[in-house]
């Protein structure tokens, strides 16, 4: 599975790094102050071209909210940045077919619509105001922005893009590795009858409803998020879960247990619990609705079509694409290693815990140690650093 998807991962992360380097996050924040349809569409687009890392998305969503963005719009941005990204669609297309790649965008639109409707009605304004007040506002003023034309024509701009690309890879290394290993074990060692016992089948709408409801629960207990859950989704599809159940599971990357704990730290217990339940409802409904849409157009594949194929090494298209991907990744890595001390550029810093590249003006967390300021992609990394600074220095 990794051999099949390597080129797609490199392409997706490289494109994501380019966008993150050349598109200003401060400009995003200035236009996300409400949840009107136009603003929601704008937040969805910004999310699509942002990092696909679930942890980074949750941190940036919190940062947008704490700086004045509308809460609903911040959540839409967070969902779009993990579920409507090109690398996700490419890996879905390769592992389980074009139907699932298309369902990502169809279901993503449904999910964003449900979030826009449900969050303002199910989350009391008092909870939102309390959470906003509890968040510490950064005292770092936004720096003067360089135009994207100037960035794209400079060598430093491309080095910054390489930093974002490598940062995303490094940030997701555990999720990707764990996801492929778990999927490989699940697809080869778990008997089909175990999956069949877990998911109802042959009961029409009842089966579809149960599968869509249990998909996010599997994501919650599997600890796999971001693109790392796609190989496991392929294994679940092969094991017998319904189309809508797979879609709901894929969308539930933001419901993994570690992320729920992060929401608790960001927004407090009450809002985190309410948000998690709303997310579960939205993910399950989106999977169910998407399955209904695909049923109408007779676009749901047969399960035998979802069986993961084994690609053999040799002179084939996948090998050629992977070789090109190796050249691209080598170039990106060279730019990344020759970019010098990114903190000296006075714009970027590197999270010493997870190695993510963060923009200093938008860093979700920071801490001073021995007279030096360190910047982090999320409060969790900051806490890990403060517990044992020597480990990361």
Image (spheres, rainbow, N blue to C red):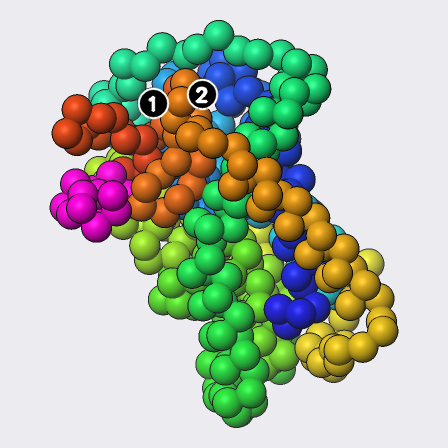
Task: State the residue position of label 2.
Answer: 345
The quarter holding residue 310 reads bottom right
The residue under the point 14% across, 46% down is: 387
Q: Secondary structure at mark 1?
A: helix
Q: Answer above or below: position of 366 versus 216.
A: above
Task: State the residue position of label 1.
Answer: 66
For the residues labelled 1 and 2, say whether their Cβ atoms are less than 8 Å apart: no
Q: Nearer the viewer, residue 279 or 345?
A: 345
Q: Residues within 10 Å of mark 2 (few under 14, many from 20)?
A: few
> Seen in the image, is 271 located left or right of residue 253?
left
Q: Disc 1 to disc 2, how far (Cα)?
A: 26 Å
Name the quarter where the N terminus is drawn: bottom right
> Seen in the image, is 329 located left or right of residue 206?
right
**Residue 2, position in %: x, y?**
62, 69
Q: Nearer the viewer, residue 184 or 324?
A: 324
Q: Answer above or below: position of 111 versus 28.
A: below
Secondary structure mostly taken by the magenta-highlighted segment of the chain: helix
> Seen in the image, is 127 located left or right of residue 256?
left
The quarter holding residue 274 reads top left
**Residue 121, position in %: x, y?**
41, 32
Range shown magenta = 380-393
The residue under the point 51% across, 22% down is: 25
The residue under the point 27% across, 14% down is: 139
**Residue 381, position in %: x, y?**
28, 43
Which numbered dot is residue 119?
none
Q: Residue furthest top?
A: 144
Q: Residues within 10 Å of mark 1 (few under 14, many from 20)?
A: many
Mark 1 vs 2, N-terminal side: 1
**Residue 341, position in %: x, y?**
42, 30
Front tag of 1 and 2: 2
**Magenta includes 359?**
no
């Amino acid at each position: 599975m990794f051999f099949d998807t390597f080129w797609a991962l490199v392409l997706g992360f490289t494109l994501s790094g380019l966008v993150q380097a050349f598109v200003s996050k401060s400009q995003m924040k200035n236009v996300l102050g409400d949840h009107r349809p136009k603003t929601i569409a704008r937040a969805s687009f910004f999310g699509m071209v942002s990092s696909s890392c679930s942890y980074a998305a949750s941190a940036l969503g919190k940062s947008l909210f704490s700086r004045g963005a509308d809460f609903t719009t911040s959540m839409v941005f967070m969902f779009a940045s993990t579920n409507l990204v090109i690398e996700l669609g490419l890996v879905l297309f390769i592992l389980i077919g074009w139907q699932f790649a298309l369902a990502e965008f169809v279901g993503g639109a449904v999910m964003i619509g449900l979030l826009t409707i449900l969050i303002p009605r199910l989350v009391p304004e008092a909870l939102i105001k309390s959470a906003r007040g509890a968040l510490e506002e950064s005292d770092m003023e936004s720096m003067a922005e360089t135009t994207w034309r100037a960035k794209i024509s400079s060598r430093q701009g491309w080095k910054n893009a390489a930093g974002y690309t490598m940062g995303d890879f490094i940030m997701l290394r555990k999720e990707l590795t764990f996801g492929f290993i778990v999927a490989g074990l699940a697809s080869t060692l778990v008997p089909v009858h175990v999956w069949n016992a877990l998911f109802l089948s042959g009961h029409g709408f009842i089966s579809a409803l149960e599968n869509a409801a249990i998909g996010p629960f599997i994501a919650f207990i599997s600890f796999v998020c971001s693109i790392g859950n796609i190989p496991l989704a392929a294994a679940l599809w092969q094991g017998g879960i319904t189309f809508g159940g797979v879609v709901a599971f894929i969308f539930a990357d933001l419901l993994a247990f570690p992320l729920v704990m992060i929401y608790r730290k960001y927004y407090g217990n009450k809002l985190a619990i309410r948000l998690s339940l709303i997310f579960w409802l939205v993910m399950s409904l989106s999977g169910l609705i998407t399955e209904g849409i695909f049923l109408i157009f007779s676009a749901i594949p047969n399960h035998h079509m979802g069986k993961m194929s084994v690609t053999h090494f040799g002179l084939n298209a996948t090998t050629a694409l992977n070789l090109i991907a190796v050249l691209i990744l080598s170039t990106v890595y060279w730019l990344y290693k020759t970019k010098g001390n990114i903190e000296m550029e006075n714009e970027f810093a590197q999270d010493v815990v997870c190695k993510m590249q963060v923009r200093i003006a938008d860093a979700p967390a920071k801490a001073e140690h021995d007279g030096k300021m360190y910047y982090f992609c999320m409060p969790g990394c900051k806490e890990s650093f403060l517990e044992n600074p020597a480990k990361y220095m």
